[in-house]
Amino acid sequence: MSELKKRLSSILESPKHNTEEKLEKVCHLLDQEISYFNWTGFYFKNGDKDELKLGPYVGAETDHVIIPYGKGICGQVAVSNETFIVPDVHLQDNYLSCSIDTKAEIVVPIFKNGENIGQIDIDSHTIDPFTKEDLELLEWLCNEVSKIL
């Protein structure tokens, strides 16, 4: 994990790329390095609206470009300000299906100056794949991402 953190840090610290490019590279690296990360993307607060807007991502195309607060896992995290891990999406009532292949999801909020400004959203085609190490990595990553926003 520490090697992956180093590689993620070097992407985020790169002076050659703008923020959008950095976030896209982060998605690609996570997608390549963690086999059960099957859709990796960022959502950000859409201006003053109580909704999220899709940012850079890697994976199947999604219809969920805008997500109202409270809707789906991402929308719930926008309201609760807490990480949400769903081991089996089929057991979750308020779930927005992106793909019939998705079996689990983890969403970790990104805070800047104490405000929830976005999140990283990861879908997996495996039931209950996310580990304590994944959670730690993603929380660390969201903290690092907040520094470049």
Image: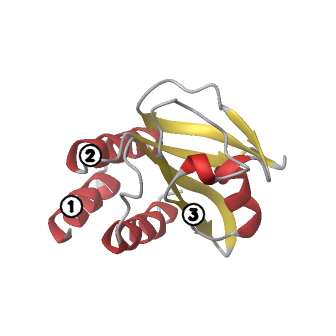
- Left or right of 106, for residue 17: left
CB atoms of marks 1 and 3 within 8 Å: no
SS for dot 2: helix
Mark 3: few, some, or many residues within 10 Å (few <14, many ≥20)?
Answer: many
Q: The disc labelled 2 sits on which kind of residue?
A: Leu
Q: CA distance from mark 2 to mark 3?
A: 19 Å
**Residue that badge 3 annotates:** 110
Q: CA distance from mark 1 to mark 3?
A: 19 Å
Q: Name, please, the residue furthest toward the left.
A: 3
The quarter of the rendered structure image containing the C terminus is bottom right
Residue 110 image point, x, y percent: 57, 63
Tell me what residue is drawn at x 52 percent, y 30 percent: 99
SS for dot 1: helix
Q: Nearer the viewer, residue 38 or 138?
A: 38
Q: Name, please, the residue furthest toward the front.
A: 91
**Residue that badge 2 annotates:** 29
User: Which of the two labelled residues, at mark 2 and mark 3, occupies the earlier sequence position?
Assistant: 2
Residue 125 image point, x, y percent: 39, 41
The quarter of the rendered structure image containing the N terminus is bottom left
Label for residue 4? 1
- Left or right of 8, for residue 92: right
SS for dot 3: strand
User: Which of the two labelled residues, at mark 1 and mark 2, occupies the earlier sequence position?
Assistant: 1
